[in-house]
C-alpha cells in the first residue's frame, strides 16, 4: 500500500518503557511492543474472540493474547508456525525523538480456515418423541465401580419414562467422561467466556460435548442425580455446572437465551443430610439457565448425619419400593410438563434475542 496516514504516538523514550501496551488511535486498537531494541505494531484485536492483544505478554517475540493464549508475531502479525492466520501489521517510524504509526495497515488480517464447531449450529428441536437425558454425577473408581444409590434411582426414572411415555432416553455418567475443569475465562473478561465453551473449542479431547449436546439441543427433560458430600452436591456435579457457565453467560454477554421450553428435575441421596440445601443450589443454577420445574421437582433420601453404616443405606435404597415409585413419579411429572410445553410449541423455537425478559410460555 502506498497511502500514508501518520499519527504521533508519543516520545520514543517513554514508549520504550513498556514491552507491550494497548493504544487506540482513531478507533483502531493497536498492540505496540518493544523488544530487543525494536518496536512492533500489530492489530490489538485477536482474531479468535476479539481479545485485547496489547494487554497480553511477549514470548519469543510473539504477542500472547490474555484471553485464550493465541499468539501472533509482534512485528509481522503472523500466527505461530503451522497456523495460516495473521493480524494486520502497521508501519512505524521515529522522527525527532517521537514515534509515529501509519494508520493504513501494511497487511490485512488473515483468518485460518477451519470448519465450524457442531455446537455453533442453530438451536432447533428436531421432530420426534419426548427425549429424556439422565445425568449421573456420582464419582467412583472406574475399574471397580460401586453401587450408586442416586444413579440406581435415576435409571429407574429413565426406564419408566421409556416404558410408560415412549420417551427416548440416554444416560450420561460424568464419571465416564474426560473433561477439564472450568479455567475461569469469564474472570479475565465477560466476553472471554464463549459459546461453545473455550475449552471445548481448543481441546478436541474434551468430552463434555455430549453434555452440551444433550442440554442445549437434544433433551426435553433433564434428570440429574447426585450424592450428598459434606452437605453439597458431588464434586463432579460442580465440575459440570462450572463448565455450564458458558450457557448462562450467553444471557448476560449476548442477550441470548439458549434454554427454552425444557424441564429439569433432581434425584438426591446420601448418608449425610442437608437435602434442602443441595436441591436449593441445584434449582437456583438451573433456573438461571432457563429450565422449568414441574410441581415437586425432586426426590431425595437420607438417613441422617449419624447414619454411618452405609451398607445399610445401600440395602434400603435397593429394597425400597417407595423410593423406586418416587423415581417413577418424578419422571411422570417432568415428562408431563414437557408434553404440555411441546403442545404449546416452545421446544421447536430457535434461540431468540431478548434475554430472560423475553422468555414466555405462550
Image (tube, helix red, strand yellow):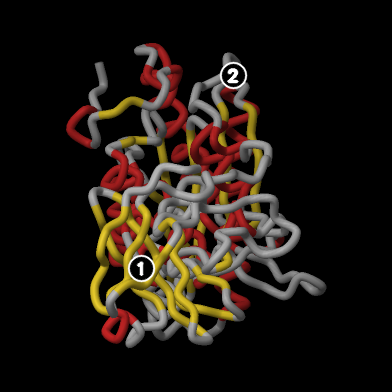
What is the secondary structure assignment of the residue under circle 1? helix
Q: Which residue is mark 1?
A: 188
The span from disc 2 to disc 1 (Cα, nearest Å) is 41 Å
Could you say which is closer to the camera, residue 23 or residue 193? 23
Identify the disc placed on residue 129.
2
Quadrant including the C terminus: top left
Camera sees residue 158: yes
Residue farthest to the front?
Answer: 96
First in sequence: mark 2 or mark 1? 2
Whole-percent x and y of residue 157? Answer: 56, 41
Q: What is the crowding at mark 2: few (fewer than 14 residues within 10 Å), some, or many (at least 20)? A: few
Whole-percent x and y of residue 254? Answer: 31, 41
User: Does 337 appear above or below 285?
Assistant: above
Whole-percent x and y of residue 210? Answer: 64, 46
Could you say which is closer to the camera, residue 121 or residue 133? 121
Splitting the image into 4 quarters, where does residue 131 fall? top right
Q: What residue appears at the point 39 percent right and 36 percent down from the top-left corner?
A: 259
Q: What residue appears at the point 24 percent right and 73 percent down from the top-left corner?
A: 10
Camera sees residue 155: no
Identify the disc placed on residue 215.
none
Q: Is residue 106 left or right of residue 292?
A: right
Amino acid at each position: 500500500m502506498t497511502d500514508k496516514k501518520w499519527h504521533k504516538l508519543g516520545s520514543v523514550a517513554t514508549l520504550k518503557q513498556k514491552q507491550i501496551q494497548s493504544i487506540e488511535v482513531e478507533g483502531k486498537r493497536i498492540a505496540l511492543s518493544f523488544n530487543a531494541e525494536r518496536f512492533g505494531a500489530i492489530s490489538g484485536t485477536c482474531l479468535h474472540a476479539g481479545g485485547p492483544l496489547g494487554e497480553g505478554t511477549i514470548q519469543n517475540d510473539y504477542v500472547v493474547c490474555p484471553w485464550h493464549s493465541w499468539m501472533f508475531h509482534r512485528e509481522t502479525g503472523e500466527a505461530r508456525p503451522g497456523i495460516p492466520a495473521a493480524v494486520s501489521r502497521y508501519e512505524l517510524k521515529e522522527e525527532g525523538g517521537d514515534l509515529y504509526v501509519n494508520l493504513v495497515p501494511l497487511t490485512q488480517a488473515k483468518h485460518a480456515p477451519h470448519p465450524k464447531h457442531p455446537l455453533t449450529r442453530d438451536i432447533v428441536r428436531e421432530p420426534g418423541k419426548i427425549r429424556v437425558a439422565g445425568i449421573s454425577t456420582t464419582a467412583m473408581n472406574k475399574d471397580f465401580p460401586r453401587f450408586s444409590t442416586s444413579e440406581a434411582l435415576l435409571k429407574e426414572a429413565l426406564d419408566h419414562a421409556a416404558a410408560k411415555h415412549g420417551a427416548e432416553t440416554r444416560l450420561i455418567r460424568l464419571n465416564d467422561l474426560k473433561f477439564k475443569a472450568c479455567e475461569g475465562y469469564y474472570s479475565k473478561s465477560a466476553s472471554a467466556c464463549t459459546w461453545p465453551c473455550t475449552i471445548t473449542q481448543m481441546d478436541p479431547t474434551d468430552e463434555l460435548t455430549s453434555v452440551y449436546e444433550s442440554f442445549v439441543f437434544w433433551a426435553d427433560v433433564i434428570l440429574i442425580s447426585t450424592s450428598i458430600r459434606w452437605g453439597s452436591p458431588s464434586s463432579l456435579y460442580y465440575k459440570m455446572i462450572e463448565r455450564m457457565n458458558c450457557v448462562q453467560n450467553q444471557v448476560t454477554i449476548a442477550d441470548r437465551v439458549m434454554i427454552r421450553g425444557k424441564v429439569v428435575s433432581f434425584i438426591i441421596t446420601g448418608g449425610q443430610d442437608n437435602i434442602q440445601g443441595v436441591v436449593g443450589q441445584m434449582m437456583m443454577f438451573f433456573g438461571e439457565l432457563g429450565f422449568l420445574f414441574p410441581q415437586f421437582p425432586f426426590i431425595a433420601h437420607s438417613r441422617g448425619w449419624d447414619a454411618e453404616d452405609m451398607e445399610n443405606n445401600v440395602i434400603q435404597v435397593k429394597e425400597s419400593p417407595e423410593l423406586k415409585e418416587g423415581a417413577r413419579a418424578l419422571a411422570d411429572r417432568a415428562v408431563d410438563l414437557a408434553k404440555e410445553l411441546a403442545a404449546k410449541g416452545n421446544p421447536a423455537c430457535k434461540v431468540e434475542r431478548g434475554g430472560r425478559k423475553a422468555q414466555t410460555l405462550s
